[in-house]
Amino acid sequence: MATPQECWDLALESFGTADIFEQRARTLSTRIRLLGFTGLVQSVLVGAVVTSFGIDFKYLKGVLVAVGAIAVAQAVLSLWSLFANWDSSLSYASESQADNTRISRRFVDLVTTQNNTVEFQVRRAEYEAREGQDSKQHITEKEKRRGMRAGLRQFKRACAQCQVVPASMTPTKCPVCGNP
C-alpha cells in the first residue's frame, strides 16, 4: 500500500511539472500571436497609409522602408518558428500541463479517500508514462527550480534545502527552489 507521503510527493512533482509546461505554453502562445500580428500589421499599415493619404504621400517611401524592416524581421521569426516547431511545442506543453494537473489531483484524491494499492499503482504508471514523455522535452535547471517552487507553494511544504515554504513564485537564492 502506498503511503500518504508518497502520494503527496508525486502530487507535488506533477503539479510542478504542470507549472513548467503552463509557463512554456504561455510563452509560446505569446510568440505565435506576435508572429501573426507582425504578418498582418505590414499590409494593414501600407493599406491604411495609401488609403488615407494617397499614393503621392510624401512620406510613403519612409513608411515602405519601415514596413520592409518589419517584413524582414517577420520572415526571420517565421523561419525560426518553423525550425523550432513552435506550434507542436505549444500543443505538447498544453497537453502536458493538463495531464500533469490531472495526475496531481488524482494523487491528492488518493490521500483524501481510501488509499488503494491497485489505484496507486495505476496512478503511478500514469505518472511515470507522463514523466517519461516530459523528460524528452529538455527541461532546464531553472525550470526545475520553478516547478519545485510551484509545487512547494501549492502544497504548503518546506523546501528540503532552505526549509522555507514559498509564499510567492519570486525566486530566492536557494539552489533547490529558487536561484534564478
Image: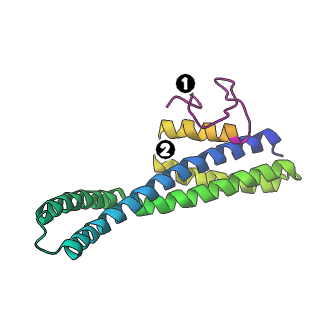
- Spot occupied by residue 137 in the image (x, y as percentages of width and height): 47, 50
Q: How many marks?
A: 2
Magenta stretch contains residue 161: yes
- Spot occupied by residue 109 in the image (x, y as percentages of width and height): 81, 53
Residue 173 is labelled as 1
Say which element carries label 2: loop
Sequence-earlier tag: 1 or 2 = 2
Relative to 144, 31 lies left or right: left
* Main secondary structure of the magenta stretch: loop
Relative to 147, 53 lies left or right: left
> What span is in magenta?
154-180
Magenta stretch contains residue 106: no
Amino acid at dot 2? Ile
Residue at (49%, 31%) from the top-left corner? 180
Report which residue position mark 2 lands on.
Answer: 139
- Spot occupied by residue 14 in the image (x, y as percentages of width and height): 65, 48
Determine whether label 1 and label 2 are within 8 Å by CB: no
Q: Nearer the viewer, residue 33 or 158?
A: 33
Say which element carries label 1: loop
Q: Please identify the residue farthest to the right as the structure is shown.
A: 114
Amino acid at dot 1? Lys
